[in-house]
């Protein structure tokens, strides 16, 4: 496992790097030896933030982050999150392989939601603060849901392997998942 550690607006000591490498290194049980793990540490006032992104050779990207007053506590929390996610992913893969099942989508046909306007002509100041670009590998909707769960987001955009179109899977408020596709 290749661990890349960087600091944002702070110098990283050998002790911090050693603690990160020791703790994150324990995840090698779940990961291929050539897996890349990017760790970013930043500090704002008394808050220490650690972000870890696991980029495997094949399979989904896994991400966790935490903010604490104590950086070593944040490292522990992130390790626990990643360990839980990797264990869950490994178990799901085993279950799917053994039972020949996949994740089931409940309520795929979502009703249209109308925006809630009060009738006034409010001018919105829309500012896009962050722009992200990423490479999309073709995958099934089930794989996209797994990826969404592993990075702990509420939605995930992907290239549908069946249609070669861009689609989005998302968590529904009442439980289950939904999918948005182009007509």
Image (cartoon, rainbow, N blue to C red):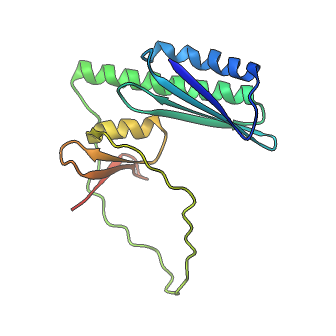
- Percent coordinates x, y for residue 66 in the rendering: 64, 36
- Percent coordinates x, y for residue 121 in the rendering: 52, 87
| Relative vertical location of residue 96 with respect to residue 64 in this rendering, above or below | above
- Percent coordinates x, y for residue 81 in the rendering: 56, 29
- Percent coordinates x, y for residue 90 in the rendering: 39, 21
Identify which residue is drawn at 39% across, 32% down.
Answer: 60
Q: Position of 61 compared to 66: left or right?
A: left
Identify which residue is drawn at 35% across, 26% down.
Answer: 58
Q: In front: 62, or 103?
A: 62
| Relative vertical location of residue 22 with respect to residue 16 in this rendering, above or below | above
Q: Which residue extends farthest bottom?
A: 120
* Residue 150, picture quadrant: top left
Q: Which residue extends farthest right?
A: 46
Q: Position of 92 compared to 117: left or right?
A: left
Identify which residue is drawn at 78% across, 36% down.
Answer: 69
Identify which residue is drawn at 55% across, 71% down.
Answer: 126
Q: In front: 98, or 180?
A: 180
* Residue 110, picture quadrant: bottom left
Q: Position of 37 compared to 163: left or right?
A: right
């Amino acid at each position: 496992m290749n661990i890349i550690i960087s600091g944002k607006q702070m110098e990283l000591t050998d002790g911090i790097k050693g603690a990160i490498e020791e703790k994150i290194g324990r995840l090698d049980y779940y990961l291929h030896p050539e897996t890349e793990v990017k760790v970013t540490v930043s500090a704002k006032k008394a808050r220490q933030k650690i972000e870890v992104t696991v980029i495997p050779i094949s399979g989904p990207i896994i991400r966790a982050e935490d903010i604490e007053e104590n950086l070593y506590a944040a490292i522990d929390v992130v390790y626990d999150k990643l360990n839980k996610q990797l264990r869950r992913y490994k178990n799901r893969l085993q279950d799917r392989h053994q039972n020949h099942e996949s994740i089931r989508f409940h309520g795929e046909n979502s009703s249209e939601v109308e925006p809630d306007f009060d009738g006034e002509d409010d001018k919105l100041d829309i500012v896009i603060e962050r722009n992200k670009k990423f490479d999309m590998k073709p995958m099934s909707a089930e794989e996209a849901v797994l990826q969404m769960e592993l990075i702990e987001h509420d939605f995930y955009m992907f290239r549908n392997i069946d249609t070669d179109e861009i689609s989005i899977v998302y968590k529904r408020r009442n439980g289950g998942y939904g999918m948005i596709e182009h007509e």
